[in-house]
Image (spheres, rainbow, N blue to C red):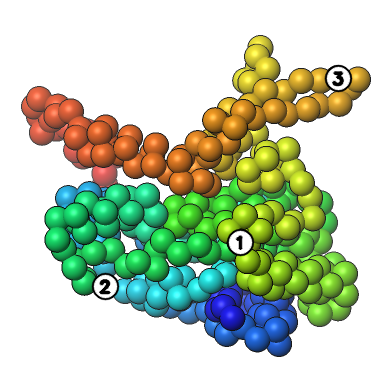
Amino acid sequence: MGKVVGFSWGRKMSNTDVMIKDILLKCEAAGHEIAFIRPDDLEIKPCTGCCACVGGIMSGRNNGSCIFKDDLHILEEAWYSADAVIVGSPVYETSPSGTFKNFCDRMGPSHDVSFLKEAYDERKAAGKTGAELPDERAFKTRIGCILGVGGAMTKNWTVMTKPIMYECMMSSGVNVIDAHVYYGAMEVEHVLGNPKQMERMGRMADNIIAALAAEDEAEKTKWRGEEEGACPVCHQSVFEVFPGSDKVECCICGIEGKIEITDGKACYTFSEKEQNRSRMRYGGKLEHSNEIKHGAMTQRRVENLKELKEKYLHVGER
Ligand SMILES: Cc1cc2nc3c(=O)[nH]c(=O)nc-3n(C[C@H](O)[C@H](O)[C@H](O)COP(=O)(O)O)c2cc1C
């Protein structure tokens, strides 16, 4: 049996909280251990962009620890202890909440599975042990579900929610098996008065239970959502298009494909090679970690930077 952890950024006991708790109850009834966390009740400071976490991993100084000694460790422990995670956020301005995004920033580069695995292998080969090595639970095959809750009556007011919510699964290599956005939530006082949405949560729970019971990796991590989507990797349909060409790029995976229109119907194709370089897969993460290691972390110095900055130092300050 596994452990299922729900993370809710919604209001206390409002729609998102209860929808996640409903999934957890069903998972518990199936024999799984459960936990529920409201990150907004913890102290999670905003990322300052210092990059000390990535620097720590890449230099061998530490395992990606943050300069802030706040409650992030509680979220990290919950994430690492889970076999399945459910993340749920209300929709604010078409997107998940700002504090959800902060979670992605704080848990992103510092928990990137490719950064940590490379560091683990290098340090292990150098004879390091125990706390000198990244936490091995970072490399466990984990599944995840995404839930967004929007009050507006039109789906397009939730459009950025799922794509941005994939971010928290991306770095730590969680396999998203289902994603759902409940829109029109303001029409009824509480989701408990909306049986269709509660039934959908039942099916999300069934998907988690089936995935955790799977005997092989492919069965465990396969997509079980209710819409296939145009991207074969993330199963969403959010693309950047390039006017004047047939190229499309999945905004979640960062992979390139082609659009072809036959009899008025669009068809999207992505080569196997491109699919394997999705940032939702290890290949894409490794590509990015090499890019950081050999580009960003070995940055070109700028001569006289202090002097060049001088004229901007006090612009607009009162
Ligand atoms: C600042 C703010 C912005 C919002 N923006 C949107 C929006 O763009 N689209 C939408 O569908 N709902 C929007 N809503 C409504 C919330 O998504 C809705 O109240 C939702 O039920 C909150 O989830 P909860 O009940 O789990 O807290 C917004 C609410 C707030 C407070």
The residue to which callout 3 is attached is 262
Q: Quadrant of residue 125?
A: bottom left
* Residue 136 drawn above or below residue 126: below
- Asked if residue 136 lies left or right of residue 58, the reply is right
Which is closer to the viewer, label 3 or label 2?
A: 3
Residue at 65% in and 34% down: 239
Q: How many marks?
A: 3
- Asked if residue 246 lies left or right of residue 282, the reply is right
The residue to which callout 1 is attached is 216
Question: Mark 2, residues whose alpha carbon is within 10 Å: few (<14), some, or many (≥20)?
Answer: few
Q: CA distance from mark 3 to mark 1?
A: 37 Å
The residue to which callout 2 is attached is 69
**Front position in the image: 308 or 250:** 250
Which is closer to the viewer, label 3 or label 1?
A: 1
Q: Position of residue 229 (x, y in %)?
A: 74, 43
Q: Amino acid at mark 1?
A: Asp
Q: Quadrant of residue 305?
A: top left
Q: Position of residue 19 (x, y in %)?
A: 71, 75
Q: Is residue 188 visible?
A: no
Mark 2 or mark 1: which comes first in sequence? 2
